[in-house]
Image (cartoon, rainbow, N blue to C red):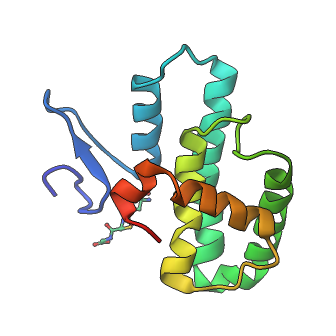
């Protein structure tokens, strides 16, 4: 409650006392703060689109049981067809969009153990994300 009045994680607090909660807001903030090159409003909007998609559409579609049968096939089919053509969600480079979507997808084998064999490009993508040092540092090897 000291950082997030709703008592949920993730939440961050910086040395200057700045507090922020909601994973999507935290990702947007960190991506902007630590961007290595200037990001156009269009690119920023595209990255934010994926962060909001992860939290508002993909997460509820997969992890809310009542939605799963209806939503998951169409979400995963569309993701699979995108990821057949490119290694990451926005251009060919890993971005905050992949942090949002990839980390959510990687909760599937941890929490639900669903069969994802119908989505081979998504499975390859999940492996690409989970092989990253940053993922392993925060989540361990899976
Ligand atoms: N929409 C929020 C969800 C936050 C959330 O529900 N966090 C869970 C853990 S993943 C939590 O703190 N649960 C403990 C609780 O609800 O008491 C976000 O993306 O940050």
Residue 26: where, in percent of width, then height? 39, 42
Q: Quadrant of the N terminus?
A: bottom left
Q: Picture quarter containing residue 13? A: top left
Ligand 1 rendered quadrant: bottom left
Q: Residue at x 48, y 19 (%)?
A: 36
Residue 113: where, in percent of width, then height? 58, 86
Q: Is residue 86 left or right of residue 89?
A: right
Residue 100: where, in percent of width, then height? 54, 51
Front-lying residue, 25 or 123: 123
- Tell me, yes or no, if residue 55 can be seen here: no
Front-lying residue, 82 or 23: 82
- Is 72 located above or below residue 35 in the figure? below
Q: Is residue 14 left or right of residue 112?
A: left
Residue at far top of view: 38
- Is 32 located above or below residue 52 in the figure? above
Front-lying residue, 66 or 14: 14
Q: Residue at x 60, y 39 (%)?
A: 94
Total marks placed: 0
Residue 50: where, in percent of width, then height? 64, 45
- Tell me, yes or no, if residue 22 can be seen here: yes
Q: Is residue 108 left or right of residue 122?
A: left
Q: Residue at x 29, y 62 (%)?
A: 8
Q: Is residue 75 left or right of residue 107?
A: right
Q: Picture quarter containing residue 102? A: bottom right
């Amino acid at each position: 409650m000291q950082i997030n009045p709703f008592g949920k994680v993730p939440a961050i607090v910086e040395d200057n006392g700045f507090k922020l909660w909601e994973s999507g807001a935290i990702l947007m903030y960190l991506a902007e703060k630590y961007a290595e090159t200037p990001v156009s409003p269009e690119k920023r909007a595209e990255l934010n689109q994926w962060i909001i998609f992860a939290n508002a559409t993909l997460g509820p579609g997969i992890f809310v049981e009542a939605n799963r049968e209806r939503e998951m096939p169409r979400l995963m089919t569309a993701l699979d067809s995108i990821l057949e053509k490119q290694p990451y969600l926005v251009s060919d480079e890993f971005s905050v969009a992949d942090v949002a979507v990839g980390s959510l997808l990687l909760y599937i084998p941890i929490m639900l153990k669903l069969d994802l064999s119908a989505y081979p490009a998504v499975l390859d993508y999940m492996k690409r994300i989970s092989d990253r040092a940053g993922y392993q540092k925060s989540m361990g090897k899976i």
